Amino acid sequence: MKNQSNTEQLFTGLFLLILAITSSMFLINRILFSEMSYDSDSINILSYFTIQTNIISTIWMLVLSLHALTGSKIYKISTNINLAAAVTTYILVAGIIYWAVLVPVFYKPGETWLFSVSNIWMHTFVPAISVVMLFYAKRLALDEAKKTKRKLVLFFIYPILYIIFSIVHSINGKYLYPMFNPNAVGGWLGVAVCLIVMCFIFTLLYLALLFGVKKKNKAVL
C-alpha cells in the first residue's frame, strides 16, 4: 500500500509539474507577445484579473507538484485549504467573467481570438484543474492530520485590492473590464451593482468550496 501511495504521489506530482510548465508557457506567450482585447492599448497586460489569477494558480500548481514529488515541508503551504479554496475561487471567477461577460460582449460571427488555445486554457482548463487540485490538497491535508482555520477576511484582501485598483483605473478613463466602465453599465450606479454581484459570487463560491470539501472526498488525478 505504501509503494502504491508513493507511485501515486510521483505520478500526481509529475502531472501537475507538466501542467504548471504548460501554463507558464501560455502566460509568457500572452504577456510578451499578445494583447488583451478590452482597452489593451492603454492598460498594462499584467493589470488584468485573468493574467494575475492564472499566475497565482500556476504558482500554486507548481508548489503543489513539488510537495507531491518531494514531500518536503517547505511546500506544505500548498495543501492549506483556506489558500486552496481562495485561489480556486479567484480563477473560477476569472472563468465566469470570461464566459458570462466577455464572450457575450465581444463575440461576433467569425471571431476566433476568443476561442484561441491560450484563452481556453486560461479561462476553462486552469479553473477546472484548480477544483481537482483543491480536492487533492484536502486529501493531503487529511493524510497529514492537518487542521484548517477558516478566515473569510483574509480571502477578501485580494479582491478588495483589485477592485480599488480597477476603480482608480476607471476614474482615469482606463477600464480593465466592461463592468468597471460606467459608460457600458449605466453609470457608476451600474458599476456599483456589478461589484456587489461580483462580491456575492466571490463569497458564495469561496464558502461552497471551503465547506463543500468533505472529509470523505478523495481526489483522483
Image: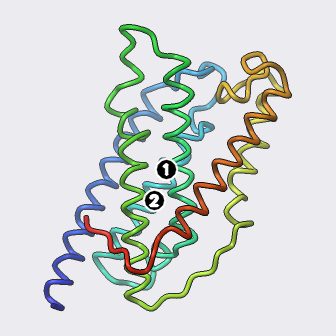
Q: Is residue 184 left or right of residue 208?
A: right
- Residue that protrudes farthest toward the top in the picture: 109
Horizontal and vertical percent for residue 166? Answer: 74, 36
Question: Which residue is depicted at the point 77% across and 31% down?
Answer: 169
131 is higher (above) or lower (below) than 100: below
Residue 59's disc is 2
Disc 2 marks which amino acid?
A: Ile
Q: Is residue 108 left or right of residue 155?
A: left
Separation of residues labelled 2 and 1 (CA atoms):
6 Å
Horizontal and vertical percent for residue 127? Answer: 43, 49
Name the residue nearer the viewer: 191 or 71.
191
Q: How is the image coloured?
A: rainbow
Question: Which residue is depicted at the point 34% across and 43% down?
Answer: 25
Q: Which residue is mark 1?
A: 55
Q: Secondary structure at mark 2?
A: helix
Q: Are marks 2 and 1 in contact (CB under 8 Å)?
A: yes
Q: Is residue 187 left or right of residue 155?
A: right
- Where residue 214 sits, quadrant-wise, is bottom left
Disc 1 marks which amino acid?
A: Ile
User: Which class describes the residues within 10 Å of circle 2: few (<14), some (14-19), or many (20+)?
Assistant: some
Horizontal and vertical percent for residue 103? Answer: 49, 23
